[in-house]
Image: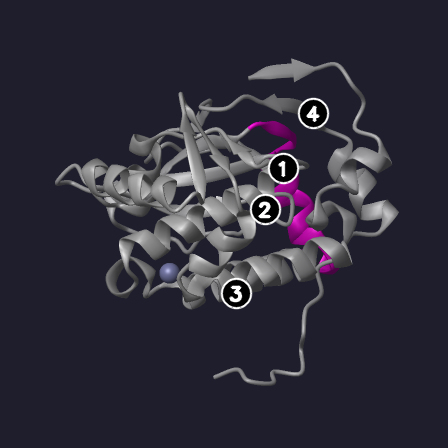
Amino acid sequence: MTLQQVKVTRDIAFKNLVLGSLSDITRNQLLREAKCIELRKGTILLEQGQVSNSVYFPTSGLLIGIHEAHDGTSIGNTVRGREGAVGAIPTARTLHPKRTGAMGRLVVQLPGEAIVVGKSHFAKILNDSFELLRVTLAHAANVIKWHEETQNCSRHHRIENRIAYWLSLLFFYGSDDSIPTTHASIAEVLGVRRESVSMALRKFEEREFIKMERSKLQLLSPELMRNYSCECETTISDLAALHAAGQLTLDTKLIGSY
Ligand SMILES: [Zn+2]
């Protein structure tokens, strides 16, 4: 992780949708103690169980959280690009001694940049600002929606379709048909065996969806891959619409809620 000595300008801040949804006054308050960091692929920003002192607002790239269970199995439980933040949503207090820190290891999946704000500074403004609370709630609503829409994925969707979805998601965030990933990394995020990933990728290669290279995959047809994705791929359309809108909005009409 490299700290860059660049000032967090308004243009840089607007690349993140949470920051871009705030008024100049609130955003400037937050950015008074902000730093811009480079996100290098594979960098671990936080270990599972560790308590973070920072809130990360990606402006490009992708952060993911990997939860490791007691039996050594793992699965991705957080996916956060420039539409969100990591550490901004206040967590419910728990009395369980092993559940006090991060629910997973926070790692850079796709390289990029992020704005980092100290957690105590963020919490202080969140306590005083209805506007920041409202934008944070809009962000939290998107995270909950994403989780609800994909919660059946690991149990009910076929591995091949899940891999196609994950690669389509990485293509969306990276905007590059050359995807830096490995069979082991895909297996870890999806919570499946590496052999199953290798078998599926070989099939994709035979069908000319992809070309496998060392530590990366070349998507030969992002469209075919997207079509082959499990039904969770609708979340990519939601993300695309959100990125295009450039703003987080909170629908308080409670339509469709329960
Ligand atoms: Zn799925």
| CA separation in Å, label 4 and label 2 | 23 Å
Q: Amino acid at mark 2?
A: Phe
Q: Residues within 10 Å of mark 2 (few under 14, many from 20)?
A: some
Type of amino acid under label 4: Cys
Closer to us: mark 3 or mark 4? 3
**Residue for badge 2:** 172
Q: Which mark is residue 58?
A: 1
Residue labelled with disc 4: 36
Measured as percent of width and height from the top left, residue 184 is found at: 29, 31
Name the kind of residue labelled 1 in the image: Pro
Ligand 1 image-quadrant field = bottom left
Q: Which residue is mark 3?
A: 234
Element type at mark 4 = strand
Tell me where the magenta segment starts and ends, as one range: 111-132
Q: Locate residue 114 relative to residue 43 in the image: left or right.
A: right
Image point 30% across, 62% down: which residue? 157
The picture places residue 46, in percent across and down from the top left corner, at 42, 29
Left or right of residue 44: residue 156: left
Instruction: State how far apart marks 4 and 1 are (Cα).
Output: 9 Å
In the image, is 84 to the left or to the right of 233? right
- Mark with earlier residue (3, 1): 1
Q: Nearer the viewer, residue 33 or 14?
A: 14
**Is the C-beta separation of discs 4 and 1 under 8 Å?**
no
**Cβ–Cβ under 8 Å for marks 2 and 3:** no
- Say whether disc 2 or disc 3 marks the residue closer to the N-terminus: 2
